[in-house]
């Protein structure tokens, strides 16, 4: 597996950016809206995102000592596994865009995770789960290149089809309450999130799963598919090819999801389907990620197969490489540009937090 931190001069320059310069950089490079696909930038959006970066950065500086900094979200990995991502050889003409070309194959790494900010939380605790896919060998310039992996394209998915807010301002307030030591702080959540946001958050955070691979995942946020006048907005999903429900073990240990994945992949490969869902001909908008795109209105279409190889992924070097990877939905071809407010803010937040982690831990 490729290590992402070379001592390239460019990266070192980034690592030494002072916090204020980092914020200025994020502000200057804040994504422009694509009005043709329904994007519009809120009046206070950019300021709210800068404040959010400061809130999350402060939280990481307080939570971790230098050398130990973890991801702010999804810090606990069940493992990074190797896979091959193969685009359908018979992909119809209207689904050919960017990296989705008939029969194209990409070697990949997939990081499965828990969402909770506490990396020690046991796997049997209710939570939302993550699946971050990195394809390598994808030709073409990326919207935000990873200097250590310029040929990479990331897809970042979670185990729910909707989010619990549409803007940065609420997320800042949410982070403060979520990290508060007072158990009464939680009583503020319905006021911050509103009724719909509270219901969505409850559904997202109350999930228990029996196996990281035998779980459906969704991009939640929309992405451009194609370029020019033919471009459309889509969401992604990855699902196990074998949909048979898996039972929870009788006495699950704190890391039973890693154990379950180790056990399955020691016996053979496991297959997942990668799908896209278009909003064309529907009323769904790219700025609203609290509404699930109903599959009966906007069906998912199979575009690729993910073959997770038989392997022993739980090794020291592979786990260390996994920890140092920095996924970002903007590690993407222009034909797969992330859309909507939550994706715009993720560009700035993921870059800033990734840099902070490296600043605290040193390049490795
Ligand atoms: C307000 C919106 C969001 C914020 C502020 C946020 C923030 C973050 C941060 C700071 C990280 C750690 C990045 C790093 O250290 O490299 C992260 C990771 C992650 N986020 Fe988000 N996120 C948001 C929305 C979403 C959404 C909508 C999804 C849906 C798919 C998502 C899925 C993930 C996953 C799966 C990871 C772990 C990636 C990995 O395995 O490294 N996030 N997020």
Image (tube, grey):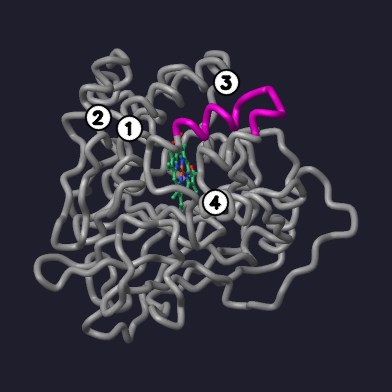
Q: Quadrant of residue 31?
A: top left
Q: Does the residue labelled 4 lie within 8 Å of ligand 1?
A: no
Quick check: is 185 in the magenta stretch?
yes
Label ID, residue 49 = 1
Badge 1 or badge 4: first in the primary sequence = 1
Who comes first in sequence, dot 4 or dot 2? 2
Mark 4 neighbour class, 10 Å CA radius: few under 14, some 14 to 19, many 20 or more: few
* Image quarter hosting the C terminus: top left
Q: In this view of the protein, which residue sits in the foreground, 22 or 177?
A: 177
Q: Which of marks 2 and 1 is nearer the N terminus?
A: 2
Q: Are marks 2 and 1 in contact (CB under 8 Å)?
A: yes
Tell us which disc is closer to us: 1 or 4.
Answer: 4
* Residue tagged 4: 195
Span colored in magenta: 172-186
From the image, tell me which residue sits under label 2.
Answer: 26
Query: Real-space Cα distance between discs 2 and 1?
Result: 9 Å
Left or right: 80 as drawn, with respect to 276: right
Where residue 94 appears, as percent x and y from the top left, is: 22, 81
Identify the residue shown where x is 18% and y is 69%.
231
- State the SS at label 2: helix
Label 1 and label 4: CA atoms lie apart by 23 Å
Query: Who's the residue at 42% across and 38% down the image?
Result: 326
Residue pictured at 21% horizontal, 37% vertical: 30
**Neighbours of disc 1 within 10 Å: few (<14), some (14-19), many (20+):** many
Q: Is the magenta stretch mostly helix, strand or loop?
A: helix
Of label 3 and label 1, which has the lower sequence position?
1
Residue annotated with mark 3: 68
Q: Which of marks 4 and 3 is nearer the N terminus?
A: 3
Disc number lying in front (4 or 2): 4
Q: Mark 4–mark 2 contact, CB under 8 Å?
A: no
């Amino acid at each position: 597996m490729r290590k992402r931190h070379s001592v390239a001069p460019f990266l070192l320059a980034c690592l030494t950016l002072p916090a204020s310069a980092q914020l200025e950089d994020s502000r200057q490079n804040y994504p422009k809206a694509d009005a043709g696909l329904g994007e519009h930038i809120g009046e206070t959006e950019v300021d709210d995102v800068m404040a959010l970066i400061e809130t999350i950065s402060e939280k990481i500086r307080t939570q971790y000592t230098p050398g130990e900094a973890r991801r702010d979200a999804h810090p606990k990995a069940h493992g990074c596994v190797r896979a091959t991502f193969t685009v359908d050889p018979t992909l119809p003409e209207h689904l050919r865009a960017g990296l989705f070309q008939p029969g194209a194959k990409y070697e990949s790494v997939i990081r499965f995770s828990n969402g909770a900010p506490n990396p020690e939380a046991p796997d049997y605790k209710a939570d939302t789960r993550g699946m971050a896919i990195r394809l390598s060998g994808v030709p073409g310039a990326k919207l935000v290149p990873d200097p250590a992996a310029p040929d990479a394209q990331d897809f970042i998915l979670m185990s729910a089809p909707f989010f619990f807010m549409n803007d940065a301002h609420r997320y800042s307030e949410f982070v403060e309450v979520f990290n508060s030591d007072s158990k009464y702080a939680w009583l503020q959540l319905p006021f911050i999130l509103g009724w719909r946001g509270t219901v969505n958050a409850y559904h997202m955070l109350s999930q228990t799963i029996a196996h990281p691979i035998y779980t459906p995942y969704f991009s939640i946020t929309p992405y451009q598919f194609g370029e020019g006048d033919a471009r459309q907005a889509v969401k992604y999903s990855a699902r196990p090819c074998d949909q048979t429900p898996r039972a929870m073990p009788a006495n699950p240990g704190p890391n039973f999801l890693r154990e379950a994945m180790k056990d399955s992949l020691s016996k053979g490969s496991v297959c997942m389907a990668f799908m896209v869902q278009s909003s064309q001909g529907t009323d769904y908008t790219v700025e609203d990620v609290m509404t699930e795109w109903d599959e009966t209105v906007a069906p998912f279409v199979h575009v690729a197969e993910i073959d997770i190889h038989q392997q022993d992924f739980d090794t020291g070097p592979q786990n260390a490489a996994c920890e140092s990877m920095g996924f970002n939905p903007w590690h993407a071809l222009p034909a797969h540009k992330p859309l909507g407010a939550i994706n715009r803010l993720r560009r700035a937040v993921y870059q800033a937090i990734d840099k902070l982690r490296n600043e605290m831990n040193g390049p490795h």
